[in-house]
Amino acid sequence: MKALQHLNKYFYKYKTYLTIGVIITIVARIFLLYTPRYVKKIFVVVEKGLEGSINKEVFKSELIEAVLYIVGAALIGGILTFFMRQTIINVSRYIEYDLKNEVYSQYQKLSLNFYKKNRTGDLMNRISEDVGRVRMYVGPALMYSINTITLFVIVIIYMVNASPKLTLYTILPLPILSVIIYKLSKEIHHRSTVVQEYLSKLSTYTQESFSGISVIKAYGIEPLTNKNFNELALESKEKQISLTRVQAWFFPMMILLIGASNLLVIYIGGMQYINGEIESLGTIAEFIIYVNMLTWPVATVGWVTSIVQQAEASQKRINEFLKLEPEIKNKVENPTEIDGDIVFSNVSFVYDDTNIQALNNISFTIKKGETLAILGKTGSGKSTILDLIGRLYDINAGSITINNTPIDQLNLNNLRNSIGYVPQDAFLFSDSIKNNIKFGNEDATDDDVVLAAKKAYVHKNIVNFKNGYNTVLGERGITLSGGQKQRVSIARAIIKSPKILLFDDCLSAVDTETEEKILKNLNKISSNKTTVIVSHRVSSVKNADKIIVLDNGKIIQEGKHESLINTEGYYKHLYLKQLSENEANKS
C-alpha cells in the first residue's frame, strides 16, 4: 500500500465530497438493515396470529405496518445508494483527471534523455491503463470498502443483540476467509505487475508498428511483424490467464463460506428454537437475511482486494516516473530578456545514453543579427549545437552565454519562447495545416498564417489542397511530402517572430530552385535576428556571416564563404563536388 500513499493528497483535496459520501453510505446501510428486523417482526406477528394471542385487526395492522416499513426503508436506502455512487464515483473521476494531468505535466518536464530511454507505448500505457486501474481503487474499491465495513459493523451489532451464540457460529468462517484473501492477494499483486508490464510491451510494439507501417510494407515484412505480435500477444494472454486463475478462486470461496454460514444458522438456530433458547423462528429468518446481506460485501472483499493490488502495481509504475527529477531545471523564476548574442566557450558535451562525445572544446561567437552556418559530416555534432542553444541538454564542460549571461541562469521558458526551431525531422501534428503553423504563435491571425506560409514558399501548395489551410494532416504530417513538411515547419518558426532562429538541415527535401527562394525570404526575415543554419549544402550557407565546419565534434575550419572556397579543406572539397553535381544535373 506504500505506493498508493501518493494519492493521499487527492483524498485530502476532495475530503468534503468523500465525507458526504461516507455519511450517505452509512445512512443508506442503516435504512436497508430495517428489512431483516421487520421480517422478524412479521414472523412474530404471524406466530401470534396462529396462536390466537392477537385479534385479526391488530394482526392485519401490525402486518401492514411492517410491510410499509420494509418498502419505505428499501426506497430510502435505494435513493441514498444512488447518491452514494454519484458522490464517490465522481470523486474517482476527479482524481483520475488530476492524476493524468500530473503524469502528463511530469512528462513535459523530463529531458530528452528520458525519452531516449523509455518507449512511447510504455509511456502511453502508464497514463491510460495504469491510471485507469488506480481510478478503480479511488472509486469502486473505496466505495465498496466503506459499504462493506459499515454493513459489517451494523449487522454484527444487530446480530449480537438478537442472539450472541448464533452470531458466534455464523461468523466462524470469516477468519478462514481472511487467511485465504491474504494469501491470494500477495499472488495477485505479483501477477498484476507482470500483466501491466506485458500490456506496456504490447502498446509499445503496436505503436512502433503503426508509426513505421510504410517501412513494414515497403520491405514486405507484414508476416514477420504479425508473427512477432502474435507471440507477444500470446505471452500477454498467458499472463492474463495466470492472473485470472488466481482471481477466480475468490467468488467460489466466498459463496462456499457464506453457504456454510447459512447452514450453521439454520442448524444451530433450529436447535436453539427447539431448546427454547430463542423465542421465534423470526430470529432464524432475520439471521439468514443478515448472512445473505453479507454475501455480496464479503464477495467484494476479494474483488476489492484484487483491485487494490492491481492499483498498487500500477501506481508503483506511475511513481517511477513521477519521482524522477528533470535533468534540465529552470533555475531562474523571474523573466529574463533574451537579445541574441551567443557565445560558446570551450564547450564539450557527451551523450549519457551512448557515451559518445558529440562536442570537444568548441568555441565561437554569434552577435545579434548575425547568421552562423554549420557544416560537417553526419555525426560531427551539428545538431547538438542547436540542442544546447535551446538548452535541451546541459553541457559537461565550458560555458554557453546569451546576452553575457550563462544559459542556465536564464529563465528557461523565456529562452525557449525566444527561439524558433526547425528540426531536421519535421514533425507535424494530426491537425489542420493552419493550426500546425499557428503552433508557433497561438494568437496569430489567419493573415499571419498565410504570410508565414508565403515566406516559407508553401502557400501555393496549401491552397491547391481541397480544404486549403483547413486540411487535416495524417499522423506526423504523413499527408504532406517531405519538402512540404519542412516548409510548414519553417512557417511555424517564422510566425513566432523569435529573437533566435535555428534551422537544422531543414531544406534537405526541397529542390535547389525552391531552396533559393526560401533562403532569400529567410535572409530578409533574419536581418535583425540571430540565426544558426545547419546544412549539408554549400548553397544553403554561402551567404552566412560566419561558417564553421565540424568533424568529430571539433571545429576544423572557420570563416566566410569566399575565404573558405579558396582554402584547401573540407569546405572547398564539398563546394566543388556540389558545383559539379549541379552542372551535371543541368546538362
Image (tube, rainbow, N blue to C red):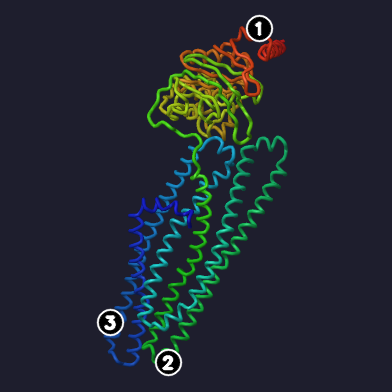
Asked if the residue under mark 2 is in contact with the one under mark 3, i.e. CB atoms within 8 Å, the reply is: no
Q: Could you say which disc has been placed on residue 277 in the image?
A: none
Residue 353 x %, y %: 61, 36
Relative to 538, 443 lies left or right: left
Residue 446 x %, y %: 43, 24
Query: Which residue occupies the foreground of this view, 481 or 504?
Result: 504
Closer mark to the observer between disc 2 and disc 1: 1
Question: What is the quadrant of residue 517 in the picture?
Answer: top right
Q: Could you say which disc has been placed on residue 61 in the image?
A: 3
Question: What is the quadrant of the C terminus in the image?
Answer: top right
Relative to 377, 3 lies left or right: left
**Label 3, label 1: how far apart the Cα atoms are:** 117 Å
Question: What is the quadrant of residue 540 in the picture?
Answer: top right
Relative vertical location of residue 144 with respect to residue 59 in this rendering, above or below? above
* Residue position marked by numbered label 1 in the rendering: 566
As helix, strand or loop, the secondary structure at mark 3 comes to helix
**Label 3, label 2: how far apart the Cα atoms are:** 29 Å
How dense is the environment of label 1, judged by Cα within 10 Å: few (below 14), some, or many (20 and up)? few
As helix, strand or loop, the secondary structure at mark 2 comes to helix
Name the residue located 39 percent from the left edge and 59 percent from the top edge: 85
* Residue position marked by numbered label 2 in the rendering: 274
Query: Which residue occupies the foreground of this view, 353 or 480?
Result: 353
Query: Which residue occupies the foreground of this view, 157 or 227?
Result: 157
The numbered mark, 3 or 1, whose residue comes first in the sequence reads 3
Amino acid type of the residue that numbered disc 2 sits on in the rendered structure? Ile
Residue 181 x %, y %: 52, 67
How dense is the environment of label 3, judged by Cα within 10 Å: few (below 14), some, or many (20 and up)? few
Question: What is the quadrant of residue 561 in the picture?
Answer: top right
Relative to 231, 190 lies left or right: left
